[in-house]
Amino acid sequence: MESKESKNSGSTDKSDQDDVFVENGISKKVDKNNAKGKKRRKCLRDKTAPRPPHSGYIRFLNDRRDQFRSENPNLPFAEITKELAAEWNQLPADKKQHYLSAAEQERVKYVEELAAYRKTDAYKNFIQRKMKKNKVNTQIQEDQEFKKEKSSVDTKLKKDQESKKEKSSGDTKLKKDQELVKVKSSNDNINTVYDIPIFTDEFLNFSKGRDSDLRYLRKTVTDQEQEVAVLDKHIENMKNGIVKLEANTEKLQAGCSKYEEHLIKLRPLLLNAFAGISFPDNIEPPTNETIDTFMVNLATTLTTATGTDTDPSWIEDVKKAISNLDFS
């Protein structure tokens, strides 16, 4: 009888151990039915919104995972991810930059599309539906979670009390369980917290899990820092380019202003020099409005004239007038 009860107790402890998960460094009791229900619960998603971009690291994983899996078919998914993470950390900077640059282009495109999408009526309607649904479901969800967690605590205490009546050695276990169970109050719900005794298998498993989480977080932080460094370098290069373009623009504007002043001064000098010249009937004398066009046509005539044709005298007069201009 005692052996059977011991097996039942062991199975109960194993089941209880399976229901423990870690949150903020503390193991918590999880209701399997509740967890299953949460997994099936569908969040309201905006299907018309632009898809978020992938980071350079994720693009690398998607690019290499299928090939690596075909080369190592016996490795589980977690080991494949771990090996690819190590390969990413050892990847040369030039090859890694290929993925980071593609991710940056996708991120810039996503930001532009998202900014444009947030101005549409579809986004406004989605926000209204989401706020309405959250307002209705918040209170119901809090009540359901409170009832399920309270039921889980009551079931645990009831089992411990029954075990105490049937087995005298159960008094010690019940007392320890009651001392370990603490109720942690929060603004929205009530969570059941368990302290883990040190130097136990449960404590070692918990410690290993935390170490694995920390390694993953460190790797994630390192990847993010690398991406931020690349973005900072791009920003710095763009700022330097903007400074150079602005300086060049100011220089060109100053040169244009100088040439414009020279043209303003040159136009009346040319008009005065051409005032005493008799032009042919087919050539209209220059005016203040047509002096620029006249000079362009005159330059064409002077460069194409051979001197062996009619050699009109007005051309010689024009050349002489231009050579006698006083620019002082």
Image (spheres, rainbow, N blue to C red):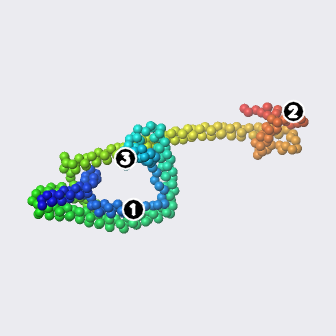
State left or right for residue 257 relative to residue 177: right
Which residue is disc 1 drawn over? 43
State left or right for residue 48 relative to residue 171: right
| Disc assigned to residue 56 | none
* Picture quadrant where residue 250 is located: top right
State left or right for residue 280 relative to residue 109: right
Which residue is disc 3 drawn over? 74
Q: Residue at x 43, y 65 (%)?
A: 129
Q: Mark 3 or mark 1: which is in front?
A: 3
132 above or below 217? below
Front position in the image: 8 or 225 = 8
Report x, y in % for residue 311: 88, 35
Q: Residue at x 17, y 63 (%)?
A: 159
Q: Secondary structure at mark 1?
A: loop
Report x, y in % for residue 73: 39, 47
Q: Quadrant of the N terminus?
A: bottom left
Q: Earlier in the sequence, mark 1 or mark 2?
A: 1
Number of on-image labels? 3
Q: Secondary structure at mark 3?
A: loop
Report x, y in % for residue 52: 46, 53
